[in-house]
Image (cartoon, rainbow, N blue to C red):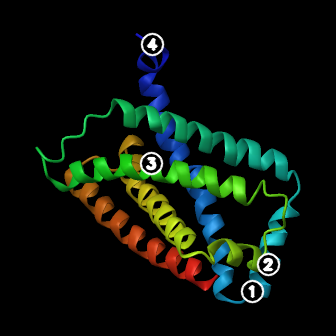
Amino acid sequence: MNFFEKHYFLLRKLHVITGVLPVGVFLLVHLTINSYALVSPEVYTQRAAMMKELPFLTFLETFFIFVPILYHGLFGLYVVYIAKNNVLKFTYSRNWAFYLQRITAIITFIFLIYHVLTTRFSGEAITYEFMSNILASPGMLIFYIVGVLAAMYHLANGLWAFFIDLGITIGPKAQRTVEIASYFIFVVLGILSVQILLAF
């Protein structure tokens, strides 16, 4: 029995929690800042610059963003590796959601690595013009749309597991309600995300 198998229950709990707190919260904050691109290039550049001026930025980024994302992503890849996908045999909705959660995990992880390396560690200030140049290529725009939609689905669908793991949604009715709500959240965040990308 390896380390992951021995401590799987606790590691899985931590994986689910970090997917919402703080990773999910950061994703929504990031989306909020990016939404200023819908207002004007100047406002977006101003709001993006404000993030760079936060006190203890390196500490906050390291321990509240990078470490949780890295843990959630790497353990998530392990979950993908050991998962038994049987959507062709059992075609009910939660089975498909389970399968799509694993697919979007891989897409999101790849997208986040690329996005962080080409923005946060680019050595350049994040401005409206900077993002416009990245998204000027049709191929890159499609890559970003796919990556962002995968991230939004992964977050929205992950809320279903989050509430179950915390013991909030116990019965089938409560779980079905959260499932419907998660689809609604995905649609809303997905539409907003695409609109933001097209605004650049």
188 over 120 or under it: above or below:
below
SS at mark 1 in the image: helix
Q: Nearer the viewer, residue 27 or 21?
A: 27
Left or right position of 56 against 183: right
Q: Earlier in the sequence, mark 1 or mark 3?
A: 1
Circle nearer the N terminus (1, 4): 4
Q: Residue at x 43, y 15 (%)?
A: 6
The residue identified by callout 2 is 45
**Mark 4 sits on what residue?**
2
The amino acid on which the numbered mark 2 sits, given as a three-letter code, is Thr
**Residue 40 found in image quarter:** bottom right
State the residue lying farthest toward the top. 1
Q: Image quarter for residue 59?
A: top right
Number of marks drawn = 4
Please, what is the three-letter code of the amino acid marked with disc 3? Ala
Q: How far across and down, in percent of the image, does residue 55 sit? A: 89, 56
Mark pair 1, 4: CA separation: 51 Å
**Outermost residue, bottom direction?**
40
Residue 192, position as x, y percentages in the image: 51, 78
Q: Is residue 88 left or right of residue 56?
A: left
Question: Which comes sooner in the sequence, label 2 or label 4?
Answer: 4
Q: Which mark is residue 130?
A: none
